[in-house]
Structure formats: structure tokens, C-alpha cells
Amino acid sequence: MSIDASILGMVFAIILFIVFFSAIVLYLAYRIKETFRSETRRGIIVTKIVFLVGILFLAGGSFYFLASTFPTSSADPTNEPPIDNGTAQLTLVVNYPSTIRMNTNLLVSFTLTNPTSYTAHDVLIQTSGLLDHFTLVSSTHNINGNIISINDVPSGNSICTLELTSLDRPLTIRETIIVTYLEMTEPITQQISITIQGGR
């Protein structure tokens, strides 16, 4: 069944429900009114009013329940595909241990994701003071100072991994990782924090 046919069927079912339920409510109200027409006692009048008000609440509650069963569309930006503006759009995920012992090796990986069909050119990762506080053991990409050169990132994932050695003293390092590339509208930034603990 197509979407249009489903919508028409839903609308038709709602109209039938409203007509049917309204007819029942009107019939009950009429029968209650006729049943207590000749009654003038206070208790009977109060009973008649309670019945009528109860029917109104029943009708309102039924319509509210019907309305609450309809699905509401909520846009989830994390599941939406990126807008195709003719250029690459990168995202960054940094994986690293939040706590490390002194004089211990650790791995820090930078995952660059390009969900578009375009290639990002001249991609650079600026590590600020990360390489000043840790000793570089090895890297999957070329490093010049605090700049990691990734070159081009085609569609998909590109991972850069650093093997580092922590300092010989306790310290907490907080810094901002910055990714730049030729087609960017603004740099990509991510905060990281690594705590070096003393002792064994």
C-alpha cells in the first residue's frame, strides 16, 4: 500500500470513528434526558448532571487517546545523511586512555570519517602540546613538530595512530585537537584530557 493510500485510509477511519462515537454519545445523552425528564428531585438532577459530564469526559478521553496513538516525526540529526554541498565534510573521533601510569606506553588514535563521495585534501591534525608532554615512539603518518600530515582523506574512514610514552611524573594534560583541510568551512576541534598517575 502506498503512503497516499495509507493516509487516506487513516483519515477515513478517523472520520468513521468520530461519527460513530458521536452518535453513541448523543444517543446516551438523549436516553438519560428522557429517563429523568419527569424527575424533579435534587438527587435525580444531580445524577443526570453527573452522567452527562461523565459522558463528556469519556468522549474527550477517547479523542485524546486516539490522538496520542498517532506517531510523531522527530528529526534525529545523528541519523540524517550529510547535506551534499559539493565538498568533503570530515568528522573526528579521538580514542585515548583517560588515565595512564608514569613511563608507560599508550596509543592515541585519530579517526577521520568522510561520509561524502568527495575527497578532503591537505588534511592536517594539530596536536598542540600533546607531543611536548609525551615521547613519540611511532606514528602511522608523518609528523612535523605538533602537526600530523594526513594528506588526502577519500570517502570512508582514515585512521592515524600514535604510540607514545608518558612522562616520569604525575600530570594532567588537557588540550584541543584541531583538524584542518582545504575544503573546510571551519576547523574541527575536540578536547582531550589524559591524567598521568604515579606509582605502580
Image (spheres, rainbow, N blue to C red):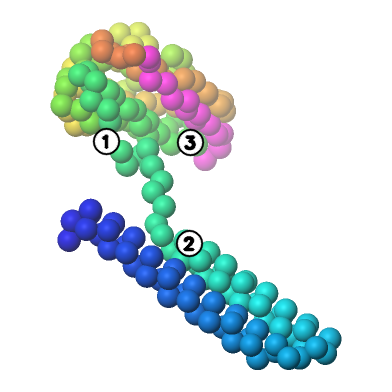
Which residue was labeled with disc 2? 68
Measuring 43% from the left and 14% from the top, which residue is drawn there?
128
The quadrant of the picture occupied by the N terminus is bottom left
**For the residue labelled by badge 3, is the local secondary structure a helix, a strand or a loop?**
loop
Q: In the image, residue 178 lies at what x, y percent?
A: 39, 17
| Circle 1/circle 3 CB separation < 8 Å | no
Q: CA distance from mark 1 to mark 2?
A: 29 Å
* Image position of 75 with respect to 66: above or below: above
Q: In the image, residue 12 lies at what x, y percent?
A: 32, 64
Foreground mark, 1 or 2?
Answer: 2
Foreground mark, 1 or 3?
Answer: 1
- Residue range in magenta is 186-200
Q: In the image, residue 90 lies at what x, y percent?
A: 29, 24
Q: CA distance from mark 3 to mark 2?
A: 45 Å
Measuring 27% from the left and 35% from the top, which residue is drawn there?
81
Q: Residue 116 lies in what quarter of the image?
A: top left
Q: Is residue 26 left or right of residue 124?
A: right
Which residue was labeled with disc 1? 81
Foreground mark, 3 or 2?
Answer: 2
Which residue was labeled with disc 3? 98
The residue closer to the viewer here, 71 or 91, is 71
* Dominant secondary structure (helix, strand or loop) of the stretch shown in magenta: strand
Q: Amino acid at mark 3?
A: Ser
